[in-house]
Image (cartoon, rainbow, N blue to C red):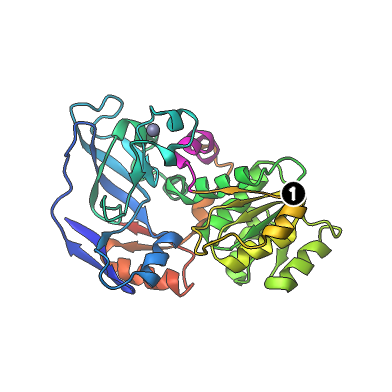
Amino acid sequence: MRATVLYGAGDVRVENVPDARLIEPTDALVAVSRACICGSDLWPYKLMKPGEPPRRMGHEAIGVVEAVGSGVRTLKVGDVVVMPFAYSDGTCAFCHEGLHTSCVHGGFFGTVELPGAQAEALRIPLADGTLVVLPVGADDALMASLLTLSDVMGTGHHAARAAKVGRGKAVAVIGDGAVGLCAVIAARRLGAEQIIMMGHHPDRIALAQEFGATDVVKERGEGAIERVRAVTGGLGVHSVLECVGTEEPMRTAIGIARAGGAIGRVGVPHYEAIPGSEPAFYNNLTIGGGPAPVRAYIQELLPDVLEGKIEPGRVFDRVIGLDEVPDGYRAMNEREAIKVMVKP
Ligand SMILES: [Zn+2]
């Protein structure tokens, strides 16, 4: 079968690899009907060091179950399923608490340990706990929005939850990638009154406004902090949804949060220590977030997608075949595309 392999910085290839197959009795084998490239895939694409082992990339997909192991109880061949970016047993203490990304038997797709979803097929460990059956056909018109439940919509929602977004709150979203745009949808869905999009790509800002952003701040650094204070009566925002993961946006987040506010960070951090410890302390800020337990959020968000109340699939602005995946990485890395869908 064909699959995507990252060999080094800027060196991603689509190759013939051994067919995915069942290994454990709790596995399912899924034929991928839709996958995508994630902003977080761009980190190793940019920064992979020489000598690191190759990685089979991709952690977002919808597919059709082709085979199940003898221990699988809730899935059958032919089911249309969505996979979260992490696998989980659904039965441990953390899964029961809704924190599936900390599952004691879990792990992540698209790593050195487990082949990823930018491929014709993939093996799903702990299939009963991991996969969610979708009540649609494999070519449903809602496929793009359903695919975002693998990661970006759940991750934007997690940022909003961690930042304690609620009715009437003033919210800022840092980052205008697919997760930031989904974070705008999530903030609006949870009742935020003011949603400030912080970004500077005109097409992404326009989409953020359609998703519910009420204000736009294009400045960065100190200028951004001044602008957000200016549009919030000098107080700052209750909730900051940090969807980038580098130090400057985190510093900005602490600078724009109002006293007693909360920051939800979902961008994979590329800094050693959280900056702004002193202002965060004196302003009584809560800093939360981490890898989103999207497995828990699929149940909450799926009805809104099926009813058309939210349309996160609009973040996809390019559709490619599997062999074009390397150009998809390039296009996302050069900010030519917001998010690329792959149809193997
Ligand atoms: Zn678990």
Q: Residue 213 in the image: x percent, y percent?
A: 69, 56
Would residue 275 appear left or right of 46 to someone viewing this image?
right
Residue 131 appears in view? no
Look at the numbered disc 1 and give the secondary structure of its residue: loop
Q: Quadrant of ligand 1?
A: top left
Q: Residue 171 in the image: x percent, y percent?
A: 71, 52
Would residue 220 appear left or right of 230 to someone viewing this image?
left
Looking at this view, is 215 or 250 the one in front?
Answer: 250
Q: How many marks?
A: 1
Q: Which residue is mark 1?
A: 284
Magenta stretch secondary structure, dominant:
helix
Looking at this view, is 337 or 262 the one in front?
Answer: 262
Q: Amino acid at mark 1?
A: Asn
Would residue 39 appear left or right of 192 to someone viewing this image?
left
Quarter of the image for residue 54 reads: bottom left
Q: Is residue 4 magenta?
A: no
Q: Residues within 10 Å of mark 1 (few under 14, many from 20)?
A: some
Which quadrant is home to the N terminus?
Answer: bottom left
Residue 126's place in the image compared with 162, above or below, is: above
Residue 286 appears in view? yes
Residue 46's place in the image compared with 264, above or below, is: below
Query: Residue sitting at 34 percent across and 69 percent down?
Result: 48
Query: Residue sitting at 83 percent across and 64 percent down?
Result: 230
Q: Which residues are magenta?
A: 291-305
